[in-house]
């Protein structure tokens, strides 16, 4: 038996020509005869591009395992390849025969991490004077490796990953042909405990600061809803001109005169690079507008022959008359109010050169809205394909693929609101990829991968650069990442579930739909930076409900029954009389509604209107200890049958009546236990008092 390395105990379990990816679904091109597939004997790199389906948000480099630097050493190289084969193929017959059972890894990116941990371990050993190969290392050496990492300030999560790799190496040792220190360096301890990583339930992901979230979402919606039609119109016009362009300029002089004869045609100008510089003629666009390929613009060359100079002079003569435009591809643009108080077009001029940047901005704006309001992960957004907006249980939803924690890539649905439908429509319009919605804008880079964090940063920079024209608020350039928006939306829907989010756009029932999408409670935890905003928003919600009751009352509708309702009606009548006496309008009524003390507890069958700073008739406060500063009702002590502050709305009566019937059924049923019958009788008395107070027959 001849072994490649003298340190080997036995031949490797794997043959050099054995495929690395086994028991996995290969891409069609990888199944063709003669196709390249990574083999165990490949000592330099394992390239899984074109072999295994790569998530849309992963770069090609993240799908390649390099055995470089320290792993070029034959011992470490073979050790790494064997360990990766065992972890990547845990159901391999030879691995199972030896009795090694490891948790399998379905993603090449994990293999890259493992290779990196082995590479840094070899580097650490050389730096600290250990033997060149780990066959002479001890358990104490491995423990010292982790101690040194922690002492150097390495993050606990990173330390845990290295501990896991060393533990798995110990478990896989029987399947390795090379020596590795025998035994678990930390028997009976988990990798988390070794790394001193506390089992905290708090999520480390921060929320997007409200000072960034609000202007960013508003800006994204402005680009999608207001500006996108202008950009898409310019793109269509530009495409039509390119398709009809003539490659020859033989008849250009006749065509120029014919074009100038139409007063609707204006000479296109470049936008001025600064206020102090005059704009110049966009000769390439003019050539395209005349019907010729834009590369033929030297036909108007200033240094050309006399005919070209005369042609140029003819155009400049019209420019001197003021027959110019910077919006040759679009016509009039949407008008905006600017920070300096002026009103004008939202962009200085959409020509062929800015068009590509604007389409990129639209794609980034669509991504911002989807990541900000859908609670989808970054990987799931990148997997969105064309025509992915569907109806799921009669509600608009995005159909996409779940990547995290699911190697089989199941299809999922995320409920969305109308703004996101519009955003995806715009993203599809600017996408050149045959399948994906979010892809590079350039036609020659469709195999490339776009990074969510870069799209967010690029959009923020673009908005801030052009805000003097668009009139949008400046977006603080804080640290933001896609996963932070998932945390933010979860927090908002948990803290603020029954109202619109004040983003300047109508989100309909987006909060409820987002909350229905799966998310952990830690994501919904409150954030101190949002406390003030949520309190203000809740006050606005209460005001809108009070205003709705006021409008219904002044319109003659019945808004409630009982003493509490009568007090609210009296307050509304006084406000209405004051408005009429002052010849006021809706604004006067709003001011009075905000300043008048009207206490209504919404969302309960018994809507308490008690002012607990003056608790006259508030039964809930009898013999009760009221916390300092408390102004609302005490839920556990609320008695609708005895409270003078009770307000029962018409919509509540059917619920009380139904409750009364259920109680009667329990009382009249001989099988009902005596204790339950007594409770039903007490509840029936309360219900009858409530209905009596509302004037309903029992």
Image (cartoon, helix red, strand yellow):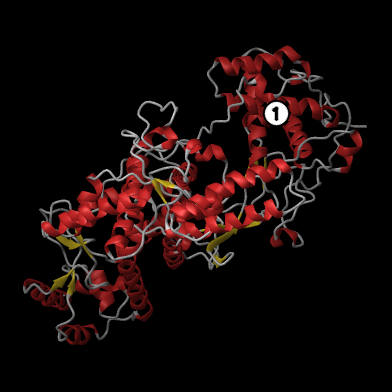
Task: Classify 82 as above or below 566.
Answer: above
Residue 499 pos. (x, y %): 40, 52
Horizontal side, residue 263 vs residue 561: left or right: left
Residue 76, image quadrant: top right
Q: Which of 350 and 630 is in front in this view?
A: 630
Residue 466 visible somewhere in the drawing: no
Horizontal side, residue 34 vs residue 93: left or right: left
Residue 319 pos. (x, y %): 10, 72
Count of picture labels = 1
Residue 280 pos. (x, y %): 16, 64
**Which residue has dot 1 on it?**
165
Q: Quick one: quadrant of the N terminus?
A: top right
Q: Is mark 1 on a helix, strand or loop?
A: helix
Horizontal side, residue 317 vs residue 544: left or right: left
Residue drawn where x is 30% and y is 60% of the image: 553
Residue drawn where x is 36% and y is 81% of the image: 244
Residue drawn where x is 21% and y is 71% of the image: 332
Q: Nearer the viewer, residue 469 or 325?
A: 469
Residue 149 visible somewhere in the drawing: yes
Q: Residue furthest right?
A: 1
Q: Residue furthest left?
A: 321
Q: Nearer the viewer, residue 355 or 185?
A: 185
Residue 427 pos. (x, y %): 44, 63
Residue drawn where x is 55% and y is 52% of the image: 516
The crowd level at tag 1 (other Cα within 10 Å; few <14, some 14-19, many 20+) is: some
Residue 401, image quadrant: bottom right
């Amino acid at each position: 038996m001849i072994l490649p390395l003298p340190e080997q105990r036995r031949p490797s379990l794997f043959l050099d020509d054995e495929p690395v990816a086994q028991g996995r679904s290969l891409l069609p091109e990888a199944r063709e005869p003669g196709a390249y597939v990574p083999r165990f004997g490949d000592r330099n790199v394992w390239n899984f591009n074109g072999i295994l389906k790569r998530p849309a948000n992963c770069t090609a480099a993240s799908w390649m395992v390099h055995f470089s630097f320290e792993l070029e050493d034959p011992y470490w190289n073979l050790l790494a390849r064997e360990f990766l084969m065992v972890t990547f193929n845990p159901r391999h017959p030879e691995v199972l025969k030896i009795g090694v059972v490891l948790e399998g890894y379905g993603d090449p990116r994990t293999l890259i991490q493992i290779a990196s941990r082995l590479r840094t371990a070899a580097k650490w050993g050389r730096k600290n004077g250990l033997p060149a190969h780990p066959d002479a290392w001890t358990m104490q050496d491995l423990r010292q490796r982790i101690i040194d990492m922690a002492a150097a300030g390495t993050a606990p999560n990173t330390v845990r990953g290295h501990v896991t790799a060393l533990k798995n190496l110990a478990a896989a040792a029987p399947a390795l042909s090379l020596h590795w220190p025998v035994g678990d360096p930390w028997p009976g301890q988990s990798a988390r405990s070794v790394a001193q990583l506390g089992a905290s339930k708090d999520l480390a992901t921060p929320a997007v600061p409200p000072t960034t979230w609000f202007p960013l979402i508003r800006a994204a919606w402005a680009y999608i809803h207001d500006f996108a039609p202008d950009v898409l119109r310019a793109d269509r016009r530009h495409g039509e001109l390119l398709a009809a362009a003539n490659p020859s300029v033989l008849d250009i002089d006749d065509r120029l005169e014919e074009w100038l004869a139409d007063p609707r045609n204006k000479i296109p100008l470049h936008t001025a690079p600064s206020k102090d510089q005059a704009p110049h003629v966009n000769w390439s666009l003019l050539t395209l507008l005349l019907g010729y390929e834009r590369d033929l613009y030297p036909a108007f060359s200033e240094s050309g022959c006399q005919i070209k100079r005369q042609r140029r002079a003819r155009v400049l003569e019209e420019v001197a008359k003021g027959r110019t435009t910077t919006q040759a591809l679009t016509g009039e643009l949407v008008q905006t109010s600017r920070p300096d108080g002026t009103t004008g077009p939202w962009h200085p001029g959409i020509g062929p050169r800015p068009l590509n940047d604007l389409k990129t901005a639209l794609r980034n704006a669509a991504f911002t809205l989807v990541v900000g309001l859908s609670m989808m992960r970054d990987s799931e957004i990148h997997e969105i394909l064309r025509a992915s907006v569907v109806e799921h249980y009669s509600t608009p939803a995005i159909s996409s693929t779940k990547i995290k924690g699911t190697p089989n890539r199941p299809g999922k649905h995320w409920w969305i609101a109308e703004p996101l439908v519009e955003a995806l429509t715009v993203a599809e319009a600017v996408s050149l990829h045959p399948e994906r919605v979010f892809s590079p804008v350039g036609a020659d880079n469709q195999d490339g991968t776009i990074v969510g964090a870069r799209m967010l940063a690029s959009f923020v920079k673009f908005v801030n650069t052009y805000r003097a024209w668009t009139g949008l608020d400046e977006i603080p350039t804080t640290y933001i990442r896609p996963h932070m928006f998932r945390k933010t939306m979860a927090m908002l829907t948990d803290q603020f579930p029954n109202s619109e989010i004040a983003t300047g756009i109508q989100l309909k029932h987006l909060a409820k739909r987002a909350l229905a999408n799966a998310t952990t409670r830690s994501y919904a935890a409150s954030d101190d930076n949002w406390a003030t905003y949520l309190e203000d928003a809740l006050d606005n919600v209460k005001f809108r409900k009070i205003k709705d009751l006021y409008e219904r009352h002044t319109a003659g509708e019945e808004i409630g029954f009982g003493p509490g309702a009568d007090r609210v009606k009296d307050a509304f009548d006084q406000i209405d009389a004051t408005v009429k006496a002052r010849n006021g309008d809706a604004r006067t009524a709003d001011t009075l509604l905000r300043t008048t003390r009207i206490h209504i507890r919404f969302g309960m069958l018994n809507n308490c209107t008690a002012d607990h700073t003056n608790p006259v008739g508030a039964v809930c406060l009898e013999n009760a200890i009221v916390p300092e500063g408390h102004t609302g009702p005490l839920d556990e002590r609320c008695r609708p049958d005895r409270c003078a502050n009770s307000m029962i709305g018409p919509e509540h009566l059917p619920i009380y009546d139904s409750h009364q019937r259920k109680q009667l059924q329990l009382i009249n049923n001989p099988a009902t236990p005596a204790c339950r019958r007594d409770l039903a009788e007490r509840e029936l008395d309360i219900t009858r008092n409530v209905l009596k107070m509302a004037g309903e027959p029992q």
